[in-house]
Image (cartoon, rainbow, N blue to C red):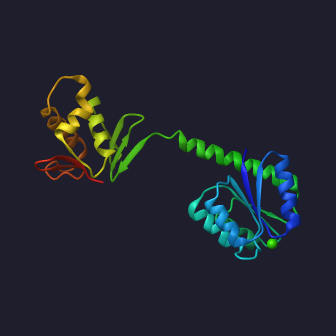
Amino acid sequence: MSRILIIEDEVAIADLEKDYLEMSGHKVELCFDGAEGAELATNGDFNLVILDLMLPGMDGYDICRKIRAVKDIPIIIVSAKKEEIDKIYGLGMGADDYMTKPFSPSELVARVKAHLSRYDRLVGANREQNDVIEIRGLRIDKTARRVFVDGEEKSFTTKEFDLLYFLASHPNKVFTREDLFKEIWAQDMVGDIATVTVHIKKIREKIETNTSNPDYIETIWGVGYRFRM
Ligand code: CA
């Protein structure tokens, strides 16, 4: 069930919108004041906002801008302002849609449905994206286990990849060679901490422009290594 906020100072219109949206299965909250509505929309947990433009407290354009500064939920403006310029301005403030009064409540319901499902697809698509770390020209794709330096793919062994990913996912933290050995090799029960040094050297050859003055993996003398953010 979607939670919808209606910011509208004309009670009859607000009630009409609410009735229709509730009939189609949404949970609806009403707010009759602009400033209060902006507060609710930015701090509340709503999936979509229906917004009037001429409101006491704060106008709809400002509310729209405030919501956009913190949230990407769909915003539908429903306003008596019919001029093209108002529409263009509203969409420019980040609204997703603009309807003029008087409006057909069933059309509003249809547009709400369309915007909610488009937004779900968008959020869903982002959720499925690979787990990637990108720092300066270095791109480490954990899901695909691939490493790119300035767009060029470099081939990594399993341990080299694990070590690089571990360091890069804990940036600016210093690890001793013992820490790293335990983290990456402990389960293998073979090798020793010199392995760490060898692997760091190999990783640097792949990702650093100048291995004697590394940009990513720094040597902290007497302590260990640190991935520089
Ligand atoms: Ca109004």
Ligand 1's quadrant is bottom right
Q: Residue at x 21, y 38 (%)?
A: 179
Nearest the camera: 198 or 63?
63
Q: Is residue 87 left or right of residue 105?
A: left
Above-or-below relation of 166 to 69? above
Quadrant of the rendered image containing residue 15: bottom right
Residue 201 in sight: no
Q: Residue at x 64, y 66 (%)?
A: 39
| Residue 103, horizontal then vertical, whole percent | 87, 61
Quadrant holding the C terminus: bottom left
Quadrant of the rendered image containing residue 177: top left
Q: Residue at x 82, y 55 (%)?
A: 108
Q: Is residue 208 left or right of residue 60?
A: left
Above-or-below relation of 67 to 58? above
| Residue 28, horizontal then vertical, whole percent | 77, 54
Q: Residue at x 60, y 63 (%)?
A: 68
Residue 99 in sight: yes
Q: Is residue 102 left or right of residue 53?
A: right
Quadrant holding the N terminus: top right
Above-or-below relation of 178 to 87? above
